[in-house]
């Protein structure tokens, strides 16, 4: 191939919408195409004729050199994935982001002016592709979570409404009991309405939005949650005992979301405790924190189950002692919510003996 | 008349050497890439008619993850590395420390296997073309996850050189297979070349 033909070919490479570098077997840059000049902000004149390792020292590593050399020796094209290397030639998009590159290095049937073998590094910019794939997968996960949250969080208040309205059909209820049942049904309805309003705001689904945090009465939240669940516990003949501090406990939180976490912990305890078991709820102050414990005499969990319990995509869906179905999602959401309030949630458990969940939140003030 | 090819001891030794040199180079690249000691061992080489391959490997209906490259020139065929799905997940987990909970794990799995497969298959084909001094041109690597039969369409007369391959990373061991699929003509010509 004569010089004119080579120049002609290298000119064509300028019009290819991929980054292209031609190297000789001494790793000198023979050609640097126009696309790569724009991406890297390095003109051909600045790099051509120079050793690529002098310009990009990170490539001067056996993990690259060996593979380039194998190609010069006759091996097939070497592929370098963006998922592993991110990029071979740094091409900044902005201050802290570089183009993700899928690169291929192949030998070409041409020699340079000194009859050295030549290889072609072609660079495909996959930044947008990678982002789009992640966005599509996230959208799909969010959709799945949307339905999971619906089924999970709507179940507890709905069960209370259905169960208590059944009880109200009986003629044995006193007026006081009826008033209490109506209150619980009303609270449950309010809780569902608030949940549905939140779900309709699609932007908030699947992620815990850091809503405005304000002073929240922990005792009040706990009592609201207990009201909804007492009936469910009674139905399984589970003894639900509650121990509260005499003084009020205030924390910085979002009331709706705190109740959501408490609902989840208490409904889980009921779900995994067999008939005639017991659940102890305790709210106290300890070392400047509000500490809430849910102790059940339920089925308990294995070490493996505990390991994945708070993970976002925990697939360990479990069925309750009475066949209750859950999504395995509530605890991961609860974990995120409590974290966003600056608190912690932890668990200890033993198979056959039960579980203890502990939530701590910094105290806002003491009365 | 059907031609039944078998490996003679000298041919088997030569192929074993070609594969061992190839996987040795691949292990060196993978060790540098992962900064861990990676060993690749091909204890046995077989020559199997392509129609018997799935039965021989007990792979009928088995879903595999494979990276394949076609080649042409002095010999025509394709070469691939493949793993049962569970082994592929384990290998990627060991190499990248990413697991199924990772964001875009499918992408990481595909790209990692594609690059690992490319390194291994390249090294074996490079070793083959260097030692036999033959001219080969290659396609780019492609990754496929499907049943064994769907990934490798049979050439009813063709043969496959099969190398059972152990990946050893620290305490862990993962078994994969490297195959070089050749037409009957290319198989005969290659075997002839091995004894020359």
Image (spheres, rainbow, N blue to C red):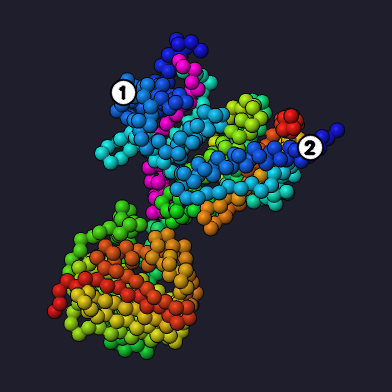
> Relative to the observer, which residue lies in front, A297 or B194?
B194
Residue pushed farthest right? Answer: B1
> Relative to the observer, which residue lies in front, A180 or B61?
B61
The local crowd at label 2, few if under 14, some if 14 to 19, many if 20 or more residues have their Cα within 10 Å, is: some
Residue A108 versus residue B170 in the image, above or below = above
* Mark 2 vs mark 1, CA separation in Å: 57 Å
Q: Residue at x 60, y 45 (%)?
A: B82
User: Which residue was labeled with disc 1?
Assistant: A46
Q: Let me know if marks 2 and 1 both belong to one chain.
A: no
**Which element carries disc 2, helix, strand or loop?**
loop
Q: Position of residue A32 (x, y in %)?
A: 38, 23
Q: Which mark is residue B5?
A: 2
Residue B151 versus residue B195 in the image, above or below = below
**Which element carries disc 1, helix, strand or loop?**
helix
Q: Residue at x 45, y 24 (%)?
A: A24
Q: Residue at x 23, y 75 (%)?
A: A290
The quadrant holding residue A10 is: top left
**Residue B129 highlighted magenta (yes or no):** no
The quadrant holding residue A22 is: top left
> Relative to the observer, which residue lies in front, A10 or A353?
A10
Tell me the quarter of the image containing the C terminus of chain A: bottom left
Residue A16 versus residue B47 in the image, above or below = above
Q: Chain of mark 1?
A: A
Q: Chain of mark 2?
A: B
Q: Residue at x 37, y 89 (%)?
A: A172
Q: Position of residue A14 (x, y in %)?
A: 39, 20
Residue A160 visible in image: no
Q: Which residues are magenta?
A: A113-142
Q: Position of residue B73 (x, y in %)?
A: 64, 25
């Amino acid at each position: 191939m004569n010089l004119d033909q080579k120049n002609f070919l290298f000119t064509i490479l300028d019009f290819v919408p991929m980054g292209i570098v031609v190297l000789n077997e001494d790793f000198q840059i023979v050609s640097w195409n126009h696309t790569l000049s724009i991406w890297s902000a390095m003109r051909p004149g600045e790099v051509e004729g120079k050793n690529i390792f002098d310009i990009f020292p990170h490539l001067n590593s056996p993990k690259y050199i060996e593979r380039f050399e194998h190609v010069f020796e006759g091996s097939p094209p070497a592929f370098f994935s963006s998922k592993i290397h991110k990029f071979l030639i740094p091409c900044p998009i902005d201050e802290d982001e570089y183009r993700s590159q899928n690169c291929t290095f192949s030998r070409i049937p041409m020699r340079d002016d000194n009859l050295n073998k030549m290889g072609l590094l072609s660079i495909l910019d996959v930044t947008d592709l990678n982002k789009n794939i992640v966005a599509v997968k996230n959208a799909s996960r969010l959709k799945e979570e949307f339905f999971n949250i619906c089924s999970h969080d709507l179940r507890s208040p709905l069960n209370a409404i259905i169960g208590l309205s059944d009880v109200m059909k009986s003629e044995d209820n006193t007026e006081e009991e009826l008033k209490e049942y109506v209150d619980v049904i009303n609270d449950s309805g309010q809780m569902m309405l608030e949940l549905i309003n939140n779900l309709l705001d699609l932007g908030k689904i699947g992620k815990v939005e850091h809503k405005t945090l304000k002073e929240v009465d922990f005792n009040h939240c706990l009592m609201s949650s207990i009201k909804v669940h007492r009936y469910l516990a009674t139905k399984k003949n589970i003894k639900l005992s509650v121990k509260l501090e005499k003084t009020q406990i205030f924390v910085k939180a979002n009331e709706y979301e705190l109740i959501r976490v408490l609902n989840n912990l208490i409904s889980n305890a009921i779900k995994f405790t067999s008939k005639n078991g017991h659940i102890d709820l305790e709210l106290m102050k300890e070392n400047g924190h509000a500490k809430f414990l849910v102790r059940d005499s339920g089925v308990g969990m294995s070490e493996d189950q505990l390991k994945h319990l708070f993970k976002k995509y925990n697939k360990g869906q479990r069925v309750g002692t009475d066949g209750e179905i859950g999504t395995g999602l509530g605890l991961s959401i609860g974990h995120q919510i409590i974290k966003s309030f600056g608190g912690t949630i932890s668990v200890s458990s033993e198979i056959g003996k039960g579980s203890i969940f502990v939530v701590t939140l910094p105290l806002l003030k003491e009365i | 008349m059907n031609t039944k090819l078998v490996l003679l001891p000298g041919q088997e030794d030569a192929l074993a050497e070609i594969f061992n040199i190839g996987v040795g180079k691949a292990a060196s690249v993978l060790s540098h890439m992962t900064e861990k000691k990676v060993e690749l061992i091909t204890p046995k080489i077989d020559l199997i008619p392509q129609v018997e391959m799935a039965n021989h490997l007990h792979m009928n209906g088995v879903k595999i993850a494979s990276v394949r490259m076609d080649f042409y020139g002095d010999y025509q065929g394709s070469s691939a590395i493949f793993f049962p799905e569970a082994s592929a997940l384990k290998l990627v987990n060991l190499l990248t420390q990413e697991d199924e909970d990772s964001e875009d794990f499918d992408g990481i799995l595909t790209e990692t296997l594609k690059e690992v497969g490319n390194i291994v298959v390249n090294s074996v084909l490079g070793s083959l073309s260097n030692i036999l001094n033959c001219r080969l041109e290659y396609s780019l690597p492609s990754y496929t996850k499907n049943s064994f039969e769907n990934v490798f369409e049979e050439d009813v007369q063709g043969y496959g050189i099969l190398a059972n391959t152990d990946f050893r990373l620290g305490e862990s061991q993962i078994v994969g297979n490297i195959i070089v699929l050749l037409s009957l003509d290319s198989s005969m010509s290659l075997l002839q070349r091995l004894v020359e």
